[in-house]
Image: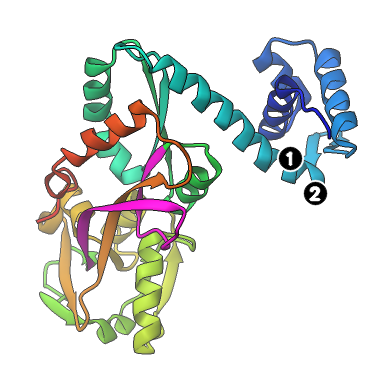
Amino acid sequence: MAQLDLKRVEYFVRVAELGSFTRAALMLGLSQPSLSRQIRLLETEVHQSLLHRHGRGVELTPAGQCMLEHGHALLGGVQRAIDALNELGSDPRGRVVVGLPYRTARLITTPLVQAFRGKFPHASITVAEGLSTVLHEWILSGRVDVALLFDPPRSSELDLELLLTEELVLVGPRAKRATLPKKIELREIVNFPLILPRIPNATRSVLEAATGRAGIKMQLSVEVDTIHNILELIGGHMGYGILPVGAVTHSGGEERFQIARIHAPVLRQRLFFAAPRHRPQTRLAAEIRQMLQKVDFPKAMGGE
């Protein structure tokens, strides 16, 4: 059975993530020839070519892509073991990685980090931000310890706890004369050119599922990834959006936009705390969960 040198695995992961031996060598504090030699030794260990070298940097081979996925898991497992050992004392010195969706991160990162540092001054916390779909992959692969996810797919691999339910509303630009009623039925959204986030996206998935069940074909006008930019385009009279009511409230609410509540059916987006079921949770990860359970998410997220 092949014996892997974990340090070489780490070197490979850095080269793969940065797409360059030069950048990886600078980050790792190694000479480029030394780093290249370590990668060749790793390729010898696994009997596979992992990287294709070209003038612009490197590309992963199919074997390299497989190795990168398992490399993240290997390095994450080693780090978790070290963190668990560091947590055995009364003053933990380990590390916890928390995954937060962009909008949630903007609202709760500061109080969460303050609470964590106040309780564990010698431990470290990493906040990884991303789309819920990306964070879902990261928690399954071990790149984050725990995460908050919007409407994750049900999985036997995750322990999920519901923290918040948000209503999705139709949002339009403020005008001298109101063009939106206070309430509309879902089938009526076909009349509005919509600015929506690209797939995969949690809000988009909720909307696609609802319109699919109702046999509705939406009028898609523009695709933009972030809520901030969707709201800016709506404010510039470029179209309409379907967004969590809290996000609209935080960005000016009815003073800046027209808001119509959707019914028949009502659309809702849900925020969950997620932890891996089949991976041991560290003390620090458990403490993060308790801290997040104390957050008043309806207030923090600007909902009703």
Q: Residue at x 76, y 23 (%)?
A: 5
Image quarter where the C terminus lies is bottom left
The CA span between labels 2 and 1 is 9 Å
Please name the amino acid that badge 2 sits on: Pro
Q: Secondary structure at mark 2?
A: helix
Q: Is residue 294 visible?
A: yes
Q: Residue at x 83, y 20 (%)?
A: 38
Quarter-wise, where is residue 285 in the image? top left
Going from the N terminus, do you reach mark 2 or mark 1 first?
A: 2
Q: Main secondary structure of the magenta part?
A: strand
Q: Position of residue 6 (x, y in %)?
A: 71, 23
According to the image, label 2 marks what residue? 62
Q: Position of residue 191 (x, y in %)?
A: 30, 83
The magenta stretch spans which residues?
146-169
Label ID, residue 228: none
Q: Position of residue 82 (x, y in %)?
A: 51, 19
Rendered view: 186 above or below 81:
below
Q: Position of residue 13 (x, y in %)?
A: 69, 31
Q: Is residue 226 visible?
A: no
Q: Residue at x 83, y 27 (%)?
A: 42
Q: Is residue 27 left or right of residue 259?
A: right
Rendered view: 27 above or below 56:
above
| Residue nearest the viewer, comparing 176 with 275 | 275
According to the image, label 1 marks what residue? 67
Please name the amino acid that badge 1 sits on: Met
Residue 230 is covered by the magenta coloring: no
